[in-house]
Image (cartoon, grey):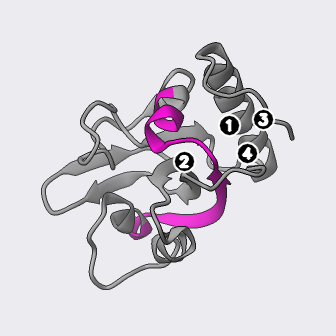
Amino acid sequence: MFGKQRPNSYIALFRCRGGYVVTRGSIFKITEGVYAYVGSCGNHCSARIVRHLHKVNVKHWHVDYLHDICDELAVVVLPYDEGSVARAMLGSFEGVPGFGNSDRREDKTHLFRVGSFNEDIIKVVLLIKRVIDESLRKRDLINDFTP
C-alpha cells in the first residue's frame, strides 16, 4: 500500500470494547467499535509499530493505554505525513478529541472510530484507503496512490 516512498506514518487498527481510556492526564470515552490510530513512523518505524501493538508495562504514549479496552488488529504503513493522514481521516470519521496529538496541537485527534465492533477489517482498510486517497488528491499532495 505504500509504494516506493519511505514510510512516514502508520495506522494501527484496534477493536475496542466500550469504556474509558485513562492516561496520566486525561480520560477518553471510547464507544464500542473499530478504531484507527494515526502515528508517525520516525526513524525506527517497525520498532515503534511493534511497541504499539503490544501491551507494555511502562505506558508513555496515548496509544499504549488503548490496550486496556482494545485488541490490536492490523497496521497499515503509509508514505504520507502523520498530520495529513489525521486531517484526511477527520473529514470522514468520528475522532476522539485530544487523543494522541499532544505533540501536534494543530491536529484535533489521532484516534478515529472507523467501524462497528463486528466490522470486517478488510472493508475498514479499503474504506480508510479511499478516504485518504480522495482527501490527499483534493489537496494535490499526492500524484499516485494505487491499490
Dot 2 corresponds to which residue? 36
Instruction: State yes or no: residue 13 in magenta.
Output: no
**Farthest residue in the left direction?**
25
Among the two numbered marks 3 and 2 on one chain, the one whose residue lies closer to the N terminus: 2
Q: Say whether disc 4 or disc 3 marks the residue closer to the N-terminus.
A: 4
Q: Earlier in the sequence, mark 4 or mark 2?
A: 2
Q: Amino acid at mark 4?
A: Val
Q: Position of residue 2 (x, y in %)?
A: 73, 50
Q: What crowding class fits label 2: few (fewer than 14 Cα within 10 Å), some (14-19), or many (20 or more)?
A: many
Q: Which residues are magenta?
A: 67-87
Contact between labelled residues 2 and 4, with CB atoms less than 8 Å apart: no
Q: Are marks 4 and 3 in contact (CB under 8 Å)?
A: no
**Residue 125 numbered tag:** 4
Q: CA distance from mark 3 to mark 2?
A: 20 Å
- Tell me the quarter of the picture where residue 116 sits: top right
Foreground residue among 70 and 61? 61
Residue 90, position as x, y percentages in the image? 48, 27
Where's residue 21, x and y in %? 30, 57
